[in-house]
Image (cartoon, rainbow, N blue to C red):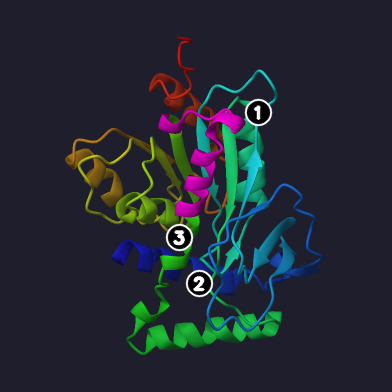
Amino acid sequence: MQSLLSTLLALLLAFTTTAFAQDGTIHPLQAPAEPRAIPLGTGGVDKQPAAESWFRQWGEPMVRNVTSATLTPFLPAPGKANGAAVLVAPGGGFRWLSINNEGWKVAQALADQGIAAFVLKYRLQPTPDSLDGLRDSMNRMFSAAGDGNPRSLVPDLSNQLADAEAAYALILSHAKEWGVDPGRIGMVGFSAGAGLTMHSTLNSKTMKLAFIAPIYGGMGPVDVPKDAPPMFNVIASDDFLFKGQFGVVKSWFDAGRPVEFHLFQNGGHGFGLGYPGNTANGWFPLFLHWLDVNGLLKPKAAP
């Protein structure tokens, strides 16, 4: 809980201090077509004041007020699939999704390597319809935190967990059609998506993940199940979520579960697959190598 709280506080602070700055101006964006998106049918969001809307910031499309979860498959080219699959959870403080930088781009990169990838557009916490309303709501939340009630900012992740479980079940139900080995389904999440990845790992009764990769998520310690999946963890030392913490990595290590950790010199927060000019740009090839060494990219031998 403390790890999730610190993650959300940092994400909201980053959003309120940069989203409305001149160099990070938010621009309204018409909703793009999502022809491959499959509705998960997990329900809506209580007390939702606004319809789903899109905006562009830092050149990337973002979506907020998601009330109907979907799953979008990115499948390898015919003959290239190796059977591995990844459920991809974008980040955004559980109030918006960086769905291209931390979703579609990542899924396509995985599919290019023969890995079936599935972008989870999960339900979000309600935000006001207007951007001014969004800013005001953020200010009110921080005022509440300043009054000594920071836990009021921690969302109930019941909706998000239900969405992740439904996505996992859908992948299983289409495993043969989509060329997926049911025993090699993992989850990769970014920022808040890393928090959802960890929450799913620690709390789901139905998801049997073969591996997880929380990318620049909360670093606080957790209670690790005896059968926790192997973890690949990435963060940059100049990320506001790091703060010299290694708790989640040490928790995995102390539990005797496989773990690989990469602390990059720079990259900040929200680098997705990586940007030129920082060392965090090199994490994705390392992740592919880790999957390969752990036998997660090896197709089953023909009977």
Q: Residue at x 43, y 59 (%)?
A: 161
Name the spot of residue 285 as percent of width and height, x first.
53, 28
Q: Is residue 273 visible?
A: no
Q: Alpha carbon of mark 1 to alpha carbon of mark 2: how far?
A: 38 Å
Say few, some or many: other residues with alpha carbon within 10 Å of mark 3 (under 14 / 14 to 19 / 20 or more): some
Q: Which mark is residue 76?
A: 1
The residue that disc 3 covers is 162
Residue 204 magenta-highlighted: no
Q: Earlier in the sequence, mark 1 or mark 2?
A: 2
Q: Is residue 144 above or below residue 106?
A: below
Residue type beneath disc 3: Ala
- Residue at image coords 79%, 57%: 32
x, y (%) of residue 106? 61, 41
Q: Which residues are magenta?
A: 165-183
Look at the numbered discs 1 and 2 and tell me whether their residues touch, using CB distance below 8 Å: no
Which amino acid does the dot numbered 2 rest on? Leu
Question: Residue 54: x, y in percent?
Answer: 73, 66
219 over 151 or under it: above or below: above
The question of residue 176 being in magenta is answered with yes
* Residue 273: mark in rendering: none
At x 64%, y 68%, the residue is 64
**Residue under circle 2?**
13
Q: Work out how far the residue at label 1 is from the one at label 3, CA to CA, in angstroms.
A: 27 Å
Kind of element beneath mark 1: loop
Circle 1: residue type: Pro
Which residue occupies the foreground of this view, 195 or 34?
34
Disc 3 is placed on an element classified as helix
